[in-house]
DNA sequence: TGAATAGTGTCTCTTAGACATTATTGT
DNA sequence: ACAATAATGTCTAAGAGACACTATTCA
């Protein structure tokens, strides 16, 4: 029996102009050389401590940065998804602010809405990642990873609204941020430059780096 | 480089005496021959259409039955978890009523609390599956798969309470069952034999076989 | 008839969303 | 002062939990 091909792929998501985008790279090698696809690569059993480690390594090699949030999404498999043969791809998803990606000219950002023409089963993989992000965002702190280290609450609300695709009541949003208790105001600094009352700047609390805070009620509980 | 070992394992969970139990099988072959472990096996690339298919096949081969609910849990990997070498195991979890398992004398049911001495990383895998079940049960219809095809609402509430490990308000529980809208009373049949008012019998609605219904508020929202 | 549990009506208290008001900046 | 948005106070309405009451069976 032919051996099973074992790879990792990364769905790197970010917000650009308040729309979710996915990061794609031009493939250097066959199959699908020249096409844009998710960053991915083989698991290196001599080098990687586990598949998560492989995903972090591939992301670093292909983009030059480390993502604070990197979570296993799911494993995709079958004989047809990769022309090289029966394959198993363990997929991770990462969330970063757009600014981190802008320095990387090799990365192409495409809106997740209306994606098509991706090689492998990458369209389905991206759809799964976006569904997971939306689902988790309804009751958790996940979207903060789409923000830069310092952000305002009005901006964070915009991020939530962009991810969820619907408006959120301002008072409720701020109440829930209090309940989640995973952001803290940074003393002394304020947003500036606009002709209105400046917003306080917040940051993710140390204890929530790499982790999430959960609600037991959705943001828009309806 | 040595090839990566690609396997599937199944965490088969059920309720016995209102406690969660996991199904283990005595291993026929090395490694760990003679020890009790999760049902598992190699992915057969000539035969399996994907890894989910492999998990269903392994479960059928080892237990003789098909589980209505079989969901991918996560993928576990690394050089140390399997003495044969660097391995990737895609793990699925299944929920069944105890009665299905009772006919299978080869299966050993152990309580998930206080499990120890399992081979591979199976203890960690079981803990992950139980955590997933508990988490999903707080806002979904998942626990119905631990019931037989016909069940009463008081029994279903007991099942939820056993899984969640805390009591649920009766009125709220029945209201949420109405909101979830995934069970329906079966006309004409009732539970019988007890010296009290008989309970109506319910069943999972057809459209929810293999799927879940979700709430946007937890059962015990506190 | 009494014991036991199923099933439902209803009250209260919490909390979400709507709306209004105050606060603080730049022009 | 005025425009603009931040931040918060407060009212109302929806929903959760508590409690009590009715319903239906067997002994």
Image (cartoon, coloured by chain):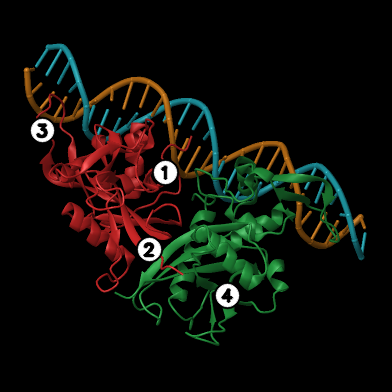
Chain colours: A green, B red, C cyan, D orange
Both marks 3 and 2 on one chain: yes
Query: In the depicted view, which residue is nearer to us: B167 or A85?
Result: A85
Mark 2 — residue? B5
Helix, strand or loop status at disc 3? loop
Residue at point 10%, 33% (across, down): B192
Residue at point 40%, 82% (across, down): A83
Give the number of the mark in front: 3 or 2: 2
Q: Is residue B152 left or right of residue A51?
A: left
Q: Which mark is residue B131?
A: 1
Discs 3, 2 touching: Cβ within 8 Å? no
Q: Which mark is residue B192?
A: 3
Q: Within the image, what quadrant is residue B15 found in?
A: top left
Both marks 2 and 4 on one chain: no
Q: Specify which label sits upstream in the sequence, 3 or 2.
A: 2
Give the number of the mark in front: 3 or 1: 1
Give the number of the mark in front: 2 or 4: 2
């Amino acid at each position: 029996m032919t051996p099973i091909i074992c790879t990792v792929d990364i769905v790197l998501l970010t917000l650009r102009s308040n729309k979710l985008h996915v990061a794609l790279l031009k493939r250097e090698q066959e199959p699908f050389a020249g096409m844009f696809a998710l960053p991915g690569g083989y698991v290196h059993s001599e080098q990687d401590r586990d598949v998560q480690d492989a995903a972090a390594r591939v992301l670093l090699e292909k983009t030059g940065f480390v993502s604070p949030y990197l979570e296993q999404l799911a494993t995709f498999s079958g004989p047809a998804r990769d022309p090289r043969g029966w394959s198993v791809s363990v997929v991770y998803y990462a969330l970063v602010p757009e600014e981190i990606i802008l320095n990387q000219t090799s990365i192409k950002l495409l809106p997740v809405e209306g994606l098509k023409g991706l090689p492998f089963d990458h369209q389905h993989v991206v759809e799964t990642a976006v569904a997971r992000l939306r689902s988790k965002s309804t009751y958790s702190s996940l979207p903060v990873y789409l923000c830069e280290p310092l952000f305002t609450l009005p901006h964070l609300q915009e991020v939530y609204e962009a991810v969820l695709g619907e408006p959120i009541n301002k008072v409720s949003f701020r109440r829930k941020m209090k309940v989640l208790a995973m952001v803290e105001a940074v003393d002394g600094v304020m947003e500036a430059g606009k002709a209105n009352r400046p917003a306080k700047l917040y940051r993710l609390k140390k204890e929530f780096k790499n982790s999430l805070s959960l609600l037991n009620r959705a943001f828009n509980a309806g």
